[in-house]
Image (cartoon, rainbow, N blue to C red):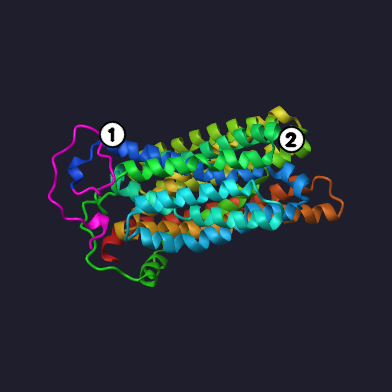
């Protein structure tokens, strides 16, 4: 039996309406631009829910800590390593499947799984219940980003991918916005358990809509490349990827950047509640607007800038990301050190714009050096490093360091722990610069490295 994306049915005439439905695409000419934007819109919603369910834990730290008697280290483990271990472990096998089967079905089923497990977090009675539920969230979310980016690369041509990936990546910040805003207010009015129910259950409905209205595209549809006639093993694919210096450098650089990124954003609600005496609703509203709007603006700005500059030199995809990482260090540092709440939040907002610039360019650079049949596995491998290093260590690093500083009598333990995590941005910028030195070769040589 043929895979959905390998079908050779007789081409159909272009449709007047949206090309939506449960069947695969058989004729690229039947897919109109508005159909492509519809898929981007739905994947945007899916990714926003992905981060809403992933990050809502951070705004609920303080009430959960008081109710379940948790330490900062345990909270860091729940938001970091407990999630990252399963997310990273399942990411590559699921992506391998997505490179050969229907990405639409994988995304829909995984969305339903992680949404249901998020709702179950609201029933947890202790640390171990929460840990098991977070394992389930991580397994489900492992089937989102890599298959989605692979689909988008087939729906949109190369010259648009920086912008498309930036739009897709901006859903991260909308998801965080919704999680902080909704989590902060629902928790304050109805309790932290209800917040998990409100966050998780809508995703099941979106999963049904996604699976019934999105069509699986032909692989390589916008690269004008025929589907591969042979299928390599996972180890053969990974071996090819690891021989590309750009791929390795970007994966490490993104992982290091994420240590700082997750170390800061995960603990921001607790930071402003502890050091600026803000309530859960106040900090949820403020950070929702700052991270949601600032992050979205920065992501979109980075995508448009990189597509424009990369027309002449593909290395700008990585140069822009490196420059943004360096500029972010003093901005975030000042936001954490300044005692005036309003000034701190303004600096944080500027930092969030700059800190989000890398999202579209980095993934556009990765997709540019990967063949269509390796895009999901390649993206998943990058996410493996990003999540195992970044999510796994970022929030845990800050939480454990905060507990350590507290034990030696340091009053500003959390503040100094977050500041120390910013050092990883400098090493991330170095990794991206190193990757840019081989990017041109890897971009144009991919056709001979199959």
User: Crowding near pointer 2: few (<14 within 10 Å), some, many (20+)?
Assistant: few
Please tell me the numbered disc located at residue 338. 2
Furthest-right residue in this view:
409
Q: Residues within 10 Å of mark 1 (few under 14, many from 20)?
A: few
Question: Is 23 left, or right, of 170 in this rendering?
Answer: left
Q: Is residue 140 left or right of residue 332?
A: left
Residue drawn at (59%, 37%), measured in percent from left and top? Answer: 351
Q: Nearer the viewer, residue 67 or 30?
A: 67
Q: Position of residue 9 (x, y in %)?
A: 15, 52
Residue 306 visible at all:
no
Contact flag, marks 1 and 2 (Cβ < 8 Å) = no
- The residue segment tinted magenta is 1-26
Q: Position of residue 399 (x, y in %)?
A: 72, 53
Determine the secondary structure under disc 2: loop
Q: Residue at x 45, y 35 (%)?
A: 301
Q: Is residue 447 above or below residue 422?
A: below
C-alpha gap between disc 1 and disc 2: 47 Å
Instruction: Please state the horizontal and vertical placement of residue 406, each as a whole percent of the image.
Output: 82, 52
- Residue 192 or residue 446, whichever sits in front: 192
From the image, tell me which residue sits under label 1: 34
């Amino acid at each position: 039996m043929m895979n959905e994306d390998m079908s050779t049915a007789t081409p159909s005439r272009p449709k007047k309406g949206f090309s939506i439905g449960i069947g695969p695409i058989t004729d690229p000419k039947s897919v109109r631009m508005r159909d492509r934007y519809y898929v981007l819109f739905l994947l945007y919603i899916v990714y926003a829910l992905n981060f809403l369910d992933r990050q809502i834990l951070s705004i609920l730290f303080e009430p959960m800590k008081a109710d379940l008697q948790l330490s900062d280290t345990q909270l860091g483990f729940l938001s970091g390593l407990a999630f990252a271990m399963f997310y990273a472990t399942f990411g590559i096998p699921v992506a391998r499947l997505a490179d050969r089967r229907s990405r639409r079905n994988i995304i829909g089923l995984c969305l339903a799984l992680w949404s249901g497990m998020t709702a179950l977090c609201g029933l947890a009675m202790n640390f171990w219940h929460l840990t098991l539920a977070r394992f389930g969230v991580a397994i489900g979310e492992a089937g989102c980003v890599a298959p989605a980016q692979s689909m988008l690369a087939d729906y949109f041509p190369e010259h648009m991918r920086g912008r498309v990936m930036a739009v897709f990546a901006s859903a991260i910040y909308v998801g965080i916005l919704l999680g902080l805003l909704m989590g902060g207010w629902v928790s304050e009015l109805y309790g932290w358990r209800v917040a998990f129910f409100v966050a998780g259950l809508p995703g099941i409905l979106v999963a049904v809509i996604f699976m019934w209205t999105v069509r699986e595209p032909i692989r390589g549809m916008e690269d004008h490349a025929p589907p591969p006639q042979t299928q390599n093993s996972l180890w053969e694919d990974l071996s090819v990827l690891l021989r590309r210096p750009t791929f390795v450098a970007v994966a490490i650089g993104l992982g290091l950047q994420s240590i700082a990124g997750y170390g800061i954003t995960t603990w921001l609600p607790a930071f402003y509640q502890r050091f600026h005496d803000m309530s859960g609703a106040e900090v949820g509203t403020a950070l929702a607007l700052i991270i949601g709007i600032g992050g979205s603006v920065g992501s979109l700005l980075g995508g448009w800038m990189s597509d424009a500059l990369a027309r002449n030199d593909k290395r700008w995809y990585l140069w822009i990301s490196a420059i943004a990482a360096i500029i972010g260090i003093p901005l975030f540092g000042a936001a954490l050190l300044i005692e005036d709440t309003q000034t701190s939040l303004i600096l944080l907002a500027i930092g969030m714009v700059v800190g989000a610039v890398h999202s579209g360019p980095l993934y556009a650079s990765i997709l540019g050096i990967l063949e269509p049949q390796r895009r999901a596995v390649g993206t998943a491998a990058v996410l493996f490093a990003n999540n195992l290093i970044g999510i796994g260590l970022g929030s845990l690093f800050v939480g454990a360091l905060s507990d350590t500083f507290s034990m030696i009598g340091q009053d500003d333990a959390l503040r100094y722990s977050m500041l120390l995590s910013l050092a990883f941005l400098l090493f991330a910028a170095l990794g991206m610069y190193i990757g840019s030195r081989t990017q041109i070769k890897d971009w144009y040589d991919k056709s001979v490295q199959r």
